[in-house]
Image (cartoon, coloured by chain):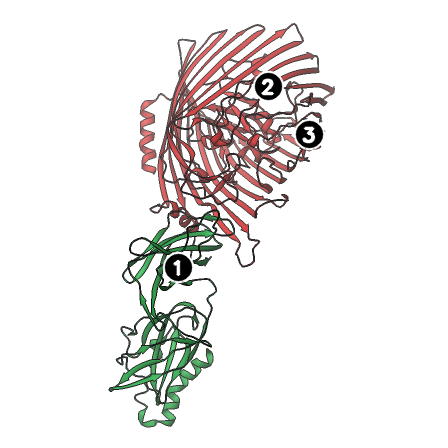
Chain colours: A red, B green
Amino acid sequence: MFRSILILAAVLFCRQAVYSQTDQHQHPHAASADTFTLQELREVVVISQRSASDRSGKPLASLDTYLEKSAAVNMIRRGSYAWEPYLNGMASERSVITIDGMRIYAACTDKMDPVTSYVETTNLASATVHNGPSGSTGGATVAGSLDLVRKKGSFGRGGFNSSIFGGFEANNRLKTGGTGVAYSGETFFANADVTYRHADNYRAGGGTEIRNSGFSKLNMSAIAGYKADEHRHLEASLIFDRASDVGYPALPMDVSLAQAYIASLEYIQHHLSPGVSEWKTKLYYNNVRHVMDDSRRPDVPIRMDMPGWSRTWGFYSQLKGSREKHDWKASLSGHHNHSLAEMTMYSDTPGWKDMYMLTWPGVATRYADLYAEDSYSFREKWKATTTAGLAVHNNLIDNITGLGSLRIFYPGLQKNRTRLLKRLSSALTRETERWLLSAAAGYGERAPGISEGYGYYLFNSFDRFDYIGNPEMRNEKTVTYGAVAAYRRSRLSAKLSGSVFQVYDYIIGKPDAGLSAMTIGAAGVKVYEQLRHARIMTGALEVSYQFGKNWLWTSKAGYRNGKGNGVGPLPLMQPFSYQEALSFTHKSFSADASIGGALKQTRFNPAFGESPLPAYAVLNLSASQLLEFGDRSLTLKAGAENLLDQNYTTFADWNRLPRMGRNIFMNVIWKF
Amino acid sequence: MKLFKNIICCLPLLAVVFLASCSKDADPVPDEIDGLKFVASLKNETHMVNLYSASGKLTTGYNEIFFQVRKADSSLVVNNISPEWAPTMKTENMSHSSPASAIAPVPGTSFLFSGFIIFPMAGDWELPITYHIDGTAYTSTGKAAVQAAQKRILESFEGSDGQKYVVTMLDPVKPVIDRNDMTALLYRMKSTNDFEPVSGYTIKIDPRMPAMGHDSPNNTDLTFKDGIYKGVVNLTMKGSWQINLQVANEKGEVIKGEPVTEANPASSIYFEIEL
């Protein structure tokens, strides 16, 4: 393994030309306000809330709602809580989601705990999206990468800053409350925060109560930095997140506990030499425990418990620098994860034993990655960016029962499998005062995820099939093309972006008529297989126009389309959707009205449980006021979502679960 | 059991006390039955036959049985006496027999025999064993209690060919979530007292978990090889399994058992496995 890394290192350093793909710049606010910078091509969702200038949505909204604003992200919704981020129309296995560069593996076999569910908006400053294999220091990916950037203080003379916040939402009686304290000193800073949320069942449009849709979540986090000298400092961070009694109305089971500890220690050094501006090295550990149960469901064919565990430790060491017209970055990272999940079904027939199996057969993932990127500026307006990465990926089934289970399906199965995962991308950008034009291409590979490779009778309640993993699959590969054209002129800004993902050996479940379903009521068994080819296209348009001093109109539209050889349309693809918003701002008061909707969904795939969807449009209104008292401030925001109480469901709603009906909300943030 | 061990231990001592002249013959040979547990004793006027098995019990289905023949002076008889057995069980108006193997000396031992008996039902079985010492035939007899196996591992049935059969499962003894080697023996009743092993048939298996209604994939039906039916049963999870059976003759005609369908949740013959 190390030999391969050394060889790669040699290859990379000989090339000396490593770029980072620049891609769609789609931050909705950036596009609409004066903060628009054409330099910034990555897609960044600003999360650090508590800001009155946040024109859309609620400052105390969940992270899921924030992420949904990104044109590259769809959030697949199985209930009120823990939505699954789909990057560029692709499931979470196809992307790398990191928290400050840390890899975390979810512990739920049914995707009820994506990595994003273990943090709070209070922990985070922003989320950075890279499309396709470009720019992913986090690791090998097909769809792209999403890095949640931790919010932290800085060294200085800020002293103490505190905030208390609270929110209430009428529809599901969601109560949000919390507090944060930050201290900033010359050689020491620390932030700590606590957030608690509790929601009851919500009501869909028309007043229908959606049972099993409440949840509770407690999140605590702390981060501290110590400055050893002018150029060196140390940071320690801890996040504890605990969700309990989480209902998943679109699924047959709920979650009694989803708990994570996420800890890290980082060493950062600046200005190592004239050519090297930053070196940071982080060690991290996280531990996730997830307990699915059905004790709140009155009618189940059989009672079951499905706990899962995931532990990861890892590190990365990253160098940044510049030389003449090159900006470069190099990163070495590695992690070790162990994931295990089991299922116990309680027999209600005397004489028949309780049933038990491993749904994730004890899988260790060992991963080492070397990544480099270079950005070369030439002829004033041009920039060429190249990125390259090589990873060694190893899976080991270390549980004998787990290995035995899979050997029933794959008699010759070896418990060890090592893969090499390569990625490469390049982009060319031309930037003038008014225009930004960028074209990018990339190649990426990924290993099958744990469920895809090793899952054992995992029930998918959308297509109603049990899924069996396939450990003998090849790497999934993608060739990605993307282009962005952005225009800006005093009051008008517009951006058109598009990308195409040509995916080879696309991993997807296909029915195996010879197998019988384990889950009572399931339609059959699907085994993960690979399509020779699948294609996903995405497109987005954003326009904003400033009327006079106070009015701003923004318009966003997006569309995705996926097709797989032999399976037709790929599931969970966004039909043509739009958002029109008009905001009024005067001093520290702002108000806005928006209409969000989608056209009729005519491309769908019944083999994955999908049905056609009618068009919908939802009206939202909100107003906010910032009151300042010296260096203290009070932010008030109130509004109504889905004002007309539409009953609707979208492509992203698992099992066509209806969305929330009319919801009146109030957020209050007191900073002192 | 402890009591029996004590008796065994005391036997040489008793021999020394009462039969001093023979003390040299009373070799300490219980080594040959190390790891085996006493099951029952059979007797006649001159000999005692002690039966052993791995568990110390006899159950319905397949039982591997060991024995030694002891003279009145408690010395062991060398295992060259060509024994035969004829297990029978008498009920009020019938006499049953059971499939049994020939008896053979256990290789590497001087006094120990082994063979197997497939008890089709629980109860007290007569186990007469006949052997020949110096040209004289002796029969030791006695009763041994056969308990019902905890799980269904034996089926007696009449085939569509009009013949009576007994089929029993040997392996898996310790089933695991995995591919499990499965072995079975099939006997045909020639007459009330005579069973013969059947070769060349196929025992088709369809494992089902009755609590859930699902099967398991990639099983291998049992075919006859080296004196036994061998196949593979896949157990995908812990719990109670039914291994539905269909017995097919050399021509592939099913003589007993039915396929499992929605209307027919189980075959009329099946084994049970629990793990």
Measured Cα–Cα span from mark 3 to mark 1 = 67 Å
The quarter of the picture where the C terminus of chain A appears is top right
Which residue is at the front of the view, A257 or A50? A257
Report crowding for label 2: few under 14, some 14 to 19, many 20 or more residues within 10 A (C-alpha). Answer: some
Whether B25 is drawn above or below A238: the answer is below
- Viewed as shown, does residue A616 lie left or right of B251? right
Distance, label 2 to label 3, CA atoms, is: 38 Å
Chain identity of mark 3: A
The chain to which mark 1 is attached is B
Is residue A115 at least partly visible in the picture? yes
Q: Which residue is mark 3?
A: A162
Please indicate whether residue A472 sits to the left or right of residue A594 in the image. left
Going from the N terminus, do you reach mark 2 or mark 3 first? 3
Question: Does residue A110 lie above or below A670 as drawn?
Answer: below
Labels 3, 1: front one:
1
Residue under the point 33% across and 84% down: B139
Residue B26's disc is: none
Badge 1 density bin: few <14, some 14–19, many ≥20, Cα 10 Å? some
Q: Quadrant of residue A639?
A: top right
Query: Is A105 or B165 nearer to us in this picture?
Result: B165
Measuring from the top left, give residue A522's x and y in whole percent. Answer: 50, 41
User: What is the chain identity of the residue bearing mark 2?
Assistant: A
- The answer to whether mark 3 and mark 1 are in CB contact below 8 A is no
Residue marked by disc 2? A597
Rendered location of residue A374, percent (x, y): 40, 21
Q: Secondary structure at mark 1?
A: loop
Three-letter amino acid code of the residue under disc 3: Ser
Identify whether A451 is placed above or below B138: above
Mark 1 belongs to which amino acid?
Pro
Badge 1 is on which residue? B172
Instruction: Please identify, in this view, whether the residue under mark 2 or under mark 3 is nearer the observer.
Output: 2
